[in-house]
Image (cartoon, rainbow, N blue to C red):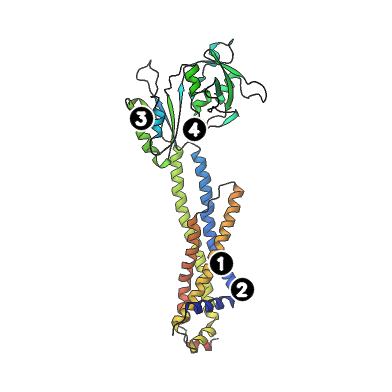
């Protein structure tokens, strides 16, 4: 005699709901296990994301490319097309450049020329701040609206040396004398964490440097960002890319030590996730197995009655297996919801980005069902092997 799937589900649901309190506790047990699985993957993943973001801010994807002079009296520069050529390298995500104009800067026309010693006047591209992750302390940065005019942005240290640490809220801003031309100070930078040389620089727009300072458009330093997994490959090809004629005179900084720390962190966290997930599922499986074994012991009379009315061993096995899967599936679904909610609350309280790996939810549900099958297998076999007379006698 065969039993339909619908009837099997109806019988299993009846067996579960007949002892609703115990079923609820069983569901809660597996839910705690799955919630633990989701939480121990989601919370470390969120913490990892926050840590990796902090490490990325240390310049793990940034390379500094500088030119070395062929002779001691030469000015080291790259071809004017070098920025565009570097940008064509596949893994490169951003390129900017500066060039030393060799101009001097003074606070006023009556100040001695030595008053600006230590401040380098650099022609800078509009995208420099975004590339090197620098920030403004006051005012604005160079853009298409002002980079063609005699305007300048001061690095943090250069601003202190020149006595201009803040810009007025109203009225004309301060000016500095660069070469023999007055330049209006339109912005002051925060200390640059990744490129300290910018702190001691006065940044002039690329077009303005060409028009007012005799700049020839050839950069002397490139700042290149690239995908972290290809940073070493990019570093290897940059010399020949930006200076095809003299690649040996190109110096490229090595990747930040933070990149190695970041990669080690990713590996460590991956191993941690696997270990914690396994422990959480094991705990949930033990709970389901215990619940189903107790259920078999308490339902001997029911098992004997069903066997005496014609139910086969296969029917009994299928019933108890289905009950175990129902309990585990319900617990898995509830556990995913509880784990996700707990992770979100904890992560937001810590100020981390919320990361809920889809694999954790999928593994939680699938793992709960698999654990339910494994945990219910022995109780189901044990129930099926009970002789009807013995089961009825012990009821």
Mark closer to the chain start, 3 or 4: 4
Q: Disc 1 to disc 2, how far (Cα)?
A: 12 Å
**What crowding class fits label 3: few (fewer than 14 Cα within 10 Å), some (14-19), or many (20 or more)?**
many
Residue 6: give its label.
none
Q: Residue at x 43, y 48 (%)?
A: 267
**What crowding class fits label 1: few (fewer than 14 Cα within 10 Å), some (14-19), or many (20 or more)?**
many
**What crowding class fits label 2: few (fewer than 14 Cα within 10 Å), some (14-19), or many (20 or more)?**
few
Q: Position of residue 345 (x, y in %)?
A: 61, 53
Residue 24 occupies which quadrant of the picture?
Answer: bottom right
Mark closer to the chain start, 1 or 3: 1
Q: Disc 3 to disc 4, how far (Cα)?
A: 20 Å
Disc 1 element: helix
Depicted 56 relative to depicted 106: above or below: below
Relative depth, front residue between 286 and 125: 125
Q: Disc 4 to disc 2, how far (Cα)?
A: 61 Å
Residue 29: give its label.
1
Depicted 305 relative to depicted 204: above or below: below
Q: Position of residue 111 (x, y in %)?
A: 58, 11
Q: Residue at x 54, y 56 (%)?
A: 39
Mark closer to the chain start, 4 or 2: 2
Q: Disc 2 to disc 3, how far (Cα)?
A: 72 Å
Residue 239: give its label.
3
């Amino acid at each position: 005699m065969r039993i339909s799937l619908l009837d099997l589900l109806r019988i299993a649901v009846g067996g579960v709901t007949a002892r609703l309190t115990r079923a609820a506790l069983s569901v809660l047990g597996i839910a705690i296990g799955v919630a633990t699985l989701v939480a121990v993957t989601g919370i470390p993943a969120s913490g990892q994301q926050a840590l990796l973001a902090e490490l990325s801010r240390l310049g793990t994807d940034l390379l500094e490319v500088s030119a070395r002079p062929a002779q001691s009296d030469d000015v080291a520069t790259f071809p004017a097309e070098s920025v565009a050529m570097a940008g064509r390298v596949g893994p490169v995500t951003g390129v900017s450049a500066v060039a030393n104009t060799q101009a001097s800067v003074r606070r006023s026309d009556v100040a001695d020329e030595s008053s600006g010693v230590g401040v380098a006047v650099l022609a800078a591209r509009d995208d420099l701040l975004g590339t090197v992750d620098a920030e403004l302390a006051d005012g604005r940065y160079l853009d298409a609206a002002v980079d063609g005019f005699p305007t300048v942005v001061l690095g943090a240290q250069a601003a202190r040396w020149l006595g201009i640490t803040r810009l007025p809220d109203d009225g004309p801003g301060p000016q500095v004398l660069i070469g023999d031309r007055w330049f209006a100070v339109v912005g002051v930078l925060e200390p640059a964490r990744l490129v300290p040389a910018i702190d001691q620089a006065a940044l002039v727009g690329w077009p303005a440097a060409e028009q007012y300072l005799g700049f020839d458009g050839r950069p002397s330093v490139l700042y290149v960002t690239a995908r972290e997994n290809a940073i070493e490959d990019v570093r290897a090809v940059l010399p020949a890319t930006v200076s095809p004629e003299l690649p040996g005179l190109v110096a490229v900084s090595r990747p930040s030590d933070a990149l190695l720390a970041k990669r080690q962190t990713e590996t460590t966290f991956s191993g941690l996730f696997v270990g914690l997930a396994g422990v959480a599922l094991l705990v949930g499986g033990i709970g389901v197995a215990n619940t189903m074994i107790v259920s078999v012991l308490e339902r001997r009379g029911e098992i004997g009655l069903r066997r005496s009315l014609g139910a086969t061993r296969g029917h009994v096995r299928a019933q108890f297996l289905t009950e175990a899967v129902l309990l585990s599936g319900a617990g898995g679904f509830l556990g995913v919801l509880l784990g996700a909610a707990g992770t979100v609350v904890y992560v937001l309280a810590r100020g981390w980005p919320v990361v809920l790996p889809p694999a954790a939810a999928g593994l939680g549900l699938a793992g709960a069902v698999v654990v339910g099958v494994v945990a219910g297998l022995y109780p189901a076999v044990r129930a099926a092997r009970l002789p009807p007379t013995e089961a009825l006698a012990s009821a």
